[in-house]
Image (cartoon, rainbow, N blue to C red):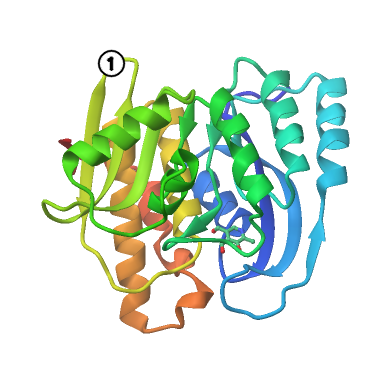
């Protein structure tokens, strides 16, 4: 068994056009020196946000047999990292993956929606069942819309006070995970921030970033992947959030400067070298 590098099973979709999910998760984790074993939940001709009718092949029937193969071989994973799911039944298959590798770090990117709206493919059933993954996760990385779906709150996109932000982090951690990171929080007191909470030592963190008024798909996937890579490499939570925030800020600004259509996603190919440099990040503050 090859175990010199950390190895992650990434249970996400593979989308063609638009630079999201496995198309960005694979290069991001690879450049950080982490081996990715992709477990595709679906294959799509593009992401669901801007290219009209999408060709989608649901791979719900693939995940369990793939898991059985890995178990039969006695293979192991340092981390199981789930994301976009194509059907509510895939929750069961993710749960099977998580329970099959009890020592692995369990990361659930609760991909369900953005900008106050659920994604087209995210049914009310899938939204409800996401709580079952959150319950077994060590780390979750919702954006503000997903945090509100998980908490059963109205999906407004109003700014949050520090007290409200902390309350949301704590209430999400009460649902299971030790670490909760909420991305893209519009803080009432100031800038946009990514915020985090570790309930094991009751620490709250925020990392402010400069907001560009364009929404690129796939940025949540890149953020969560850098966070996972950083934590697997031994970063503290605030350093990992800073590293992911800095990289996204740089990548979004670079893309914005070219004026490309947002639906094509960010120019990761032009910025990945930054992650390889592995410079420490320090842009965090306590929340
Ligand atoms: O980046 C999240 C995501 C993942 N997978 C698919 C999507 C989206 C967001 O739109 O459509 C297929």
The residue at 86%/28% (across/down) is 68
Quadrant position of residue 178: top left
* Image quarter (top left, top right, bottom left or bottom right) of the C terminus: top left
- The foreground one among 17 and 192 is 192
Percent position of residue 281, x then y = 24, 41
Callout 1 environment at 10 Å: few (<14), some (14 to 19), or many (20+)?
A: few
Count of picture labels: 1
Q: Residue furthest left?
A: 189
Left or right: 52 as drawn, with respect to 198:
right
Percent position of residue 79, x then y = 58, 28
Left or right: 278 as drawn, with respect to 149:
left
Q: Work out whether 276 lies above or below 269.
A: above
Image quarter for ligand 1: bottom right
* Image quarter (top left, top right, bottom left or bottom right) of the N terminus: top right
Residue 257 makes an appearance in the image: yes
The residue at 33%/71% (across/down) is 254
Q: Work out whether 89 lies above or below 215.
A: above
Q: Secondary structure at mark 1?
A: loop
Percent position of residue 71, x then y = 82, 22
- Residue under numbered circle 1: 201
- The foreground one among 93 and 131 is 131
């Amino acid at each position: 068994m090859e175990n010199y590098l950390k190895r992650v099973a990434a249970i996400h979709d593979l989308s063609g056009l638009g630079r999201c999910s496995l198309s960005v998760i694979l290069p991001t984790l690879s450049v950080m020196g982490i081996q990715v074993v992709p477990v595709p939940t679906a294959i799509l001709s593009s992401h669901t946000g801007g290219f009209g009718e999408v060709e989608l092949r649901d791979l719900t029937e693939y995940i369990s047999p793939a898991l059985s193969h890995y178990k039969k071989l006695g293979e192991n994973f340092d981390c199981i990292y789930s994301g976009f799911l194509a059907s509510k039944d895939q929750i069961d298959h993710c749960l099977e993956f998580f329970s099959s590798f009890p020592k692995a770090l369990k990361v659930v990117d609760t991909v369900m929606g953005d900008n106050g709206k659920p994604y087209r493919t995210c049914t009310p059933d899938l939204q409800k069942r996401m709580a079952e993954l959150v319950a077994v996760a060590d780390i979750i990385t919702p954006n503000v819309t997903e945090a509100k779906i998980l908490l059963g709150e109205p999906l407004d996109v109003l700014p949050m006070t520090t007290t409200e932000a902390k309350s949301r982090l704590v209430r999400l951690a009460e649902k299971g995970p030790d670490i909760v990171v909420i991305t893209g929080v519009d803080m009432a007191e100031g800038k946009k921030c990514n915020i985090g909470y570790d309930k094991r030592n009751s620490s709250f963190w925020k990392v402010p970033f400069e907001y560009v008024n364009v929404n690129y798909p796939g940025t949540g996937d890149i953020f969560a992947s850098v966070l996972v890579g950083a934590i697997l490499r031994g970063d503290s939570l605030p350093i990992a959030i800073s590293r992911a925030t800095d990289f996204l800020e740089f990548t979004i600004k670079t893309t914005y400067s070219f004026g490309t259509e947002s639906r094509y996603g960010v120019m990761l190919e032009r910025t990945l070298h930054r992650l390889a440099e592995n410079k420490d990040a320090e842009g965090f503050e306590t929340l």
